């Protein structure tokens, strides 16, 4: 293979760019020489080890290269600069080379030696340093890298089979699609069915206890050390006999059935031992993703009813509280597969999308009753599992590969996350690269910032003119309504199905306006406030380049309409920063004062009005209606609280949210625009990420928020930090209160006529939430994150978009500050490869344009 130079590799990999230096300095030292004995202070040991781990992992896993240890150098931290890895004059060994294992072993040994030199407590502390700063960065390796790492450190070689990833993500996608049908009334709610033993729970510790008991009773020496066995037996008799044959036990012991009887008895008794079972890796995240897609996880087990308490205790460690679980009767005598098949009657109200079970007989029996469900074999590593039928889909855990800065292939290293919700991000595995990103920040003065806006404006206006010209060329002499409809349903503007805003609907809305030759009134809600509560979504409280870009998109829409219908459009944005949740006046002022400045900067006076919804409502509905609004909201909050009486989300988020959703599922509840009220659980999950948190002293808010939300519903893991448990519980309780208030506000809005049809009759309704009869609108093309929910980002192709701050930092995006906003909050972020010595690359600065899709 052709090995590129370090500068070429770093130049296209933002994570390498922020953690590496191009050239040596007198202060740099090799890994084996660092730290300089004359140094009086050294930064936190993990902050030295982590960059080495990240850089080595990316080189090995993403680029297939092992660095030579004698050329691997460290640049010590400066006051505003974290530790960097120096790759000047580095030599690489390809992963495919026979020398790679030796080279990687030398790198690992050198980093381990460095940890020992940095530690003050000997080997134990060095191990803690490696556990915190080195090992976490080696999870979810690709197959080639994992194979190489396994030859050096087998315990570090963590990987997820691509077939397993595909199976699990396909099941999640099926749940999401089925949820859409359920919400249209065309199906039941989707569910995924799991077995318990050797499926959701790993009984490894019970297996070890049972084998040691057998060793003592029957004097079978190899059973005395179960960890040394290649594979463990299971409690299923056919699998046990195959295991005995494979291990030679049948030849060495005269009573294998007696051995099995004792193993079985010790495995299942006493019942309290079942609480030793551990959740299978990935179970908590898999359950979260099924629920986040609108589905439910249910359990169908052959365990008897008498061990329900112990089973539920083991599942609680994964945050699965009060699970919907059907068990076998205590007097069960028939085969488990028959009971499991009969148990399906208890799940008549859901549609089973997939079944996970470790026994082929169970899967066959269930497949006969669930012909549309996907059957998946679960074969946990380290067990003598029963072989499945030909073509069986098999997983070995519930882990999938998260899309993070470390796991992305080289071709996607510069990409955005393209997620719509923080719930889609596996926060537990996102990297915290804040210090490294901040050290590479770029700065634009006022002139350069205004020049960027001018270029963006020119590009936007040229695009609007092209849209108008292409529409006229395509449709010729079509009437103005048809031309305008063609423009507003273009890909760069439209969100959701085109059928939501058909030509017939457009004729209804636009016909009278066009006949009168008047500007088309367009109304939308938006620009409430930057939702900056925990530093996961946003990077500050004021609008950044994403909001400016959103205003520019509205300019583009108006320009394109004007090109085919000269009277054009007049856009009104109803800002609702204080409408659903009271917010500090200074925060609202900071946001809306800067937004007004952007409005002037993009020439918004010619096409766009920003109006506070409360002021418009007072003019249109009268001050008397507004005066009684808060009292009505309080009354509705009290009514909803009464409806949900007895529910405490802290006692079990999933079952409590399910009950709340059922109680508040009155089809008579309607929003002011006639659409259905949101499902309680869905709204709760949406509001959960904009709740203030209380990080302990000395803990950064972003890092604390990442820990709180990494497993947001899990309050019951016995190893959970007390402060983390308390803040997570308070976050859930506050989200519940905010959900109730939000629903109350929607109800009052409907009563008072706060919808845009009442405030602005005879208009076109733009909405970022597509629905029939309204024009689904996207401010920044295909960006899944609204500008005020995220942080402005300009990608490698200079497309302006919006993404979550935590995802941008994970991928090596660095801040660009502007005098238009000051140095407290980035104006936007770019891949680290486009900033050098504090200067933004002209390829970005001179070419920024709105994202099309």
Image (spheres, rainbow, N blue to C red):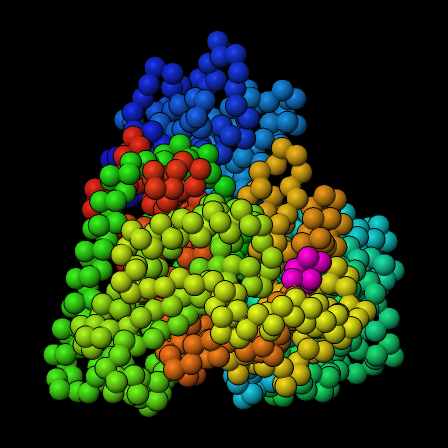
Residue 692 position, x and y percent, is: 62, 50
What is the quadrant of residue 315 in the picture? bottom right
Residue 354 position, x and y percent, is: 57, 76
- Between 619 and 540, which is closer to the camera in this rendering? 619
Q: Is residue 652 visible?
A: yes
Residue 561 position, x and y percent, is: 23, 73
Residue shown at 64%/27% (left/top)?
125
- Between 843 and 278, which is closer to the camera in this rendering? 843
The quadrant in which the C terminus is found is bottom left
Residue 342 lies, with reference to residue 155, above or below; the image says: below
Residue 75 position, x and y percent, is: 40, 23
Residue shown at 26%/49% (left/top)?
453
Residue 361 lies, with reference to residue 702, above or below; the image says: below
Residue 614 lies, with reference to residue 23, above or below; the image says: below
The quadrant in which the N terminus is found is top left
* 292 sits to left or right of 493: right
**Magenta stretch bounds:** 732-738
Residue shown at 26%/85% (left/top)?
516
* 290 sits to left or right of 251: left
- Between 663 and 198, which is closer to the camera in this rendering? 663
């Amino acid at each position: 293979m052709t090995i590129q130079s370090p500068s070429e590799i770093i130049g296209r990999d933002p994570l390498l760019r922020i953690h590496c230096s191009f050239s040596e300095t007198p202060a740099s030292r090799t890994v084996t020489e660092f730290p300089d004995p004359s140094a009086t202070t050294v930064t936190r040991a993990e902050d030295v080890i982590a960059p080495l781990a990240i850089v080595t992992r990316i080189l090995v896993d993403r680029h297939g290269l092992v660095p030579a240890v004698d050329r691997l150098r460290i640049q010590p931290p400066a006051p505003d600069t974290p530790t960097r890895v120096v790759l000047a004059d580095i030599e690489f060994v390809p992963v495919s080379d026979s020398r790679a294992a030796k080279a990687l072993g030398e790198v690992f040994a050198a980093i381990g030696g460095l940890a020992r030199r940095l530690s003050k407590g000997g080997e134990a502390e060095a191990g803690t340093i490696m556990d915190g700063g080195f090992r976490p960065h080696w999870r979810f390796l690709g197959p080639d890298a994992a194979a190489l790492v396994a030859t050096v450190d087998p315990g570090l070689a963590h990987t997820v089979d691509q077939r397993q990833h595909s199976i699990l993500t396909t099941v999640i996608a099926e749940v999401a699609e089925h949820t859409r049908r359920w919400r249209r009334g065309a199906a039941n709610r989707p569910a995924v069915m799991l077995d318990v033993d050797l499926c959701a729970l790993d009984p490894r510790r019970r297996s070890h206890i049972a084998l040691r008991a057998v060793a003592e009773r029957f004097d079978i020496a190899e059973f005395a050390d179960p960890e040394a066995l290649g594979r463990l037996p299971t409690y299923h008799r056919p699998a046990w006999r195959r295991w005995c044959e494979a291990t030679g036990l049948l030849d060495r012991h005269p009573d294998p059935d007696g051995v099995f009887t004792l193993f079985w008895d010790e495995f299942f008794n006493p019942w309290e031992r079942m609480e030793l079972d551990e959740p299978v890796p990935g179970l908590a995240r898999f359950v979260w993703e099924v629920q986040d897609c609108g589905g439910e996880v249910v359990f169908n087990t052959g365990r008897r009813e008498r061990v329900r308490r112990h089973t539920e205790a083991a599942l609680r460690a994964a945050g699965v509280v009060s699970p919907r679980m059907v068990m076998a009767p205590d007097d069960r005598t028939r085969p488990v597969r028959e009971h499991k098949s009969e148990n399906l009657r208890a799940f008549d109200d859901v549609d089973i999308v997939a079944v996970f079970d470790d026994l082929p007989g169970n899967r066959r029996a269930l497949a006969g009753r669930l012909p549309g469900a996907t059957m998946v074999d679960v074969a946990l590593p380290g067990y003598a599992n029963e072989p499945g039928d030909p073509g069986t889909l098999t997983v070995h855990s519930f882990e999938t590969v998260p899309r993070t800065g470390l796991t992305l292939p080289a071709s996607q290293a510069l990409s955005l996350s393209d997620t719509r919700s923080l719930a889609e991000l596996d926060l537990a595995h996102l990297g915290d690269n804040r210090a490294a990103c901040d050290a590479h920040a770029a700065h634009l003065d006022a002139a350069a910032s205004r020049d960027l806006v001018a270029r963006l404006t020119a590009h936007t206006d040229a695009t609007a003119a092209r849209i108008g010209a292409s529409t006229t060329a395509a449709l010729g002499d079509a009437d103005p309504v048809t031309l305008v409809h063609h423009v507003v349903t273009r890909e760069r503007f439209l969100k959701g199905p085109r059928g939501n805003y058909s030509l017939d609907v457009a004729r209804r809305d636009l016909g009278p306006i066009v006949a009168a030759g008047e500007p088309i009134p367009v109304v939308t809600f938006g620009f409430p406030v930057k939702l900056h509560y925990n530093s996961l979504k946003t990077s500050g409280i004021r609008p950044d380049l994403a909001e400016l870009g959103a205003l520019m998109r509205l300019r583009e829409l108006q320009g394109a309409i004007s090109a085919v219908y000269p009277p054009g459009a007049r856009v009104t944005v109803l800002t609702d920063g204080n409408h659903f949740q009271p917010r500090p006046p200074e925060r609202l002022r900071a946001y809306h004062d800067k937004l007004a400045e952007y409005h002037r900067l993009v020439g918004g006076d010619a096409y766009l009005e920003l109006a506070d919804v409360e002021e418009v409502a007072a003019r249109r509905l009268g001050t008397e209606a507004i005066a009684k609004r808060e009292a009505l909201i309080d009354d509705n909050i009290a009514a909803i609280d009464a409806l949900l009486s007895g529910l405490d989300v802290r006692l079990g988020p999933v079952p409590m949210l399910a009950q709340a959703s059922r109680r508040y599922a009155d089809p008579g509840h309607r929003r002011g625009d006639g659409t259905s009220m949101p499902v309680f659980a869905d709204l709760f999950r949406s509001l959960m990420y904009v709740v203030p948190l209380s990080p302990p002293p000395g803990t950064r808010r972003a890092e604390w928020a990442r820990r709180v939300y990494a497993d947001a519903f899990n309050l019951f893991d016995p190893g959970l930090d007390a402060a983390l448990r308390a803040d997570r519980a308070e976050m859930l309780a506050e989200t519940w209160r905010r959900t109730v208030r939000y629903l109350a506000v929607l109800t009052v809005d409907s009563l008072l006529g706060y919808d845009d049809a009442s405030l602005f009759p005879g208009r076109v309704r733009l909405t970022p939430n597509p629905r029939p009869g309204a024009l689904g609108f996207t401010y920044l093309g295909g960006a899944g994150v609204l500008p005020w929910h995220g942080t402005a980002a300009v990608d490698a192709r200079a497309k302006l978009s919006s993404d979550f701050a935590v995802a941008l930092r994970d991928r090596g995006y660095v801040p660009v500050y502007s005098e238009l906003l000051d140095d407290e909050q980035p104006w936007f972020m770019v891949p680290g490869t486009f900033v050098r010595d504090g200067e933004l690359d002209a390829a970005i600065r001179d070419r920024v344009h709105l994202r099309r899709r």
